[in-house]
Amino acid sequence: MICHGRRGYPDDLTGMRGSGQTTASGDADDRRDLVSAYLSLAAMLGLAVGGVLLAYLLHRRTAVAPGALTSLPFLSGWRPDEHALSRFEARYYPMTLLFLAFDVEMLYMYPWATVVASIGTSAIVEMFVLLGVLMTGVLWAWREGALRWT
């Protein structure tokens, strides 16, 4: 009969934790595993903080106006503190959304192309449904005038 010890491990298996038998090498291995886990955690935290610091320093170095903006929101007639080329025209946003829609479509088409032969007709039908949904979006954007540049 197996009796469970203090940690839920079986007591009658030799060499298992919870059996009441501990060895010096087992304790050293546990400590080594714990130190390894803490060092891995510290390395990940260091990389994250270093990445954020690097991004901040790169932003400060390459910004058009490195200092913080001191004017009110929406400028309200004040002289702008930023360069005019840092703004984007609103007509680029619908085109960007269309590009992203078709770019994400390619994320589905590449794996689909590798399995379409093994799956068969249902995979082809599913891809045509996806393309139909995307084409409906393009026709809607065209009807709403999102593709007009004037």
Image (cartoon, helix red, strand yellow):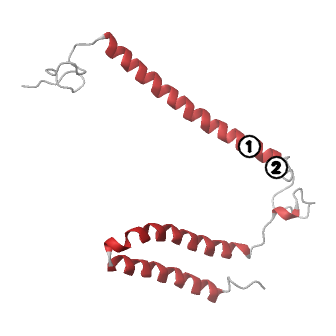
Q: Is residue 138 left or right of residue 15?
A: right
Query: How many C-alpha atoms fall within 10 Å of the one at disc 2: few (<14), some, or many (≥20)?
Result: few
CA gap, disc 1 and disc 2: 10 Å
Q: Quadrant of residue 46?
A: top right
Mark 1 belongs to which amino acid? Tyr
Q: Is residue 105 above or below residue 45?
A: below
What mark, if any, has residue 31 been given in the picture?
none
Q: Is residue 142 above or below residue 108?
A: below
Residue under the image location 85 percent in, 64 percent down: 85
Q: Is residue 115 above or below residue 138?
A: above
Residue 119 lies, in percent from the top left, at: 32, 72
What mark, if any, has residue 62 been given in the picture?
2
Residue 20 lies, in percent from the top left, at: 22, 14
Q: Is residue 4 left or right of residue 96?
A: left
Considering every residue shown, the one lying at the far right of the view is 79
Tell me whether the residue at label 1 lies in contact with that at label 2, contact meaning CB atoms closer than 8 angstroms: no
Upstream in the sequence, badge 1 or badge 2? 1
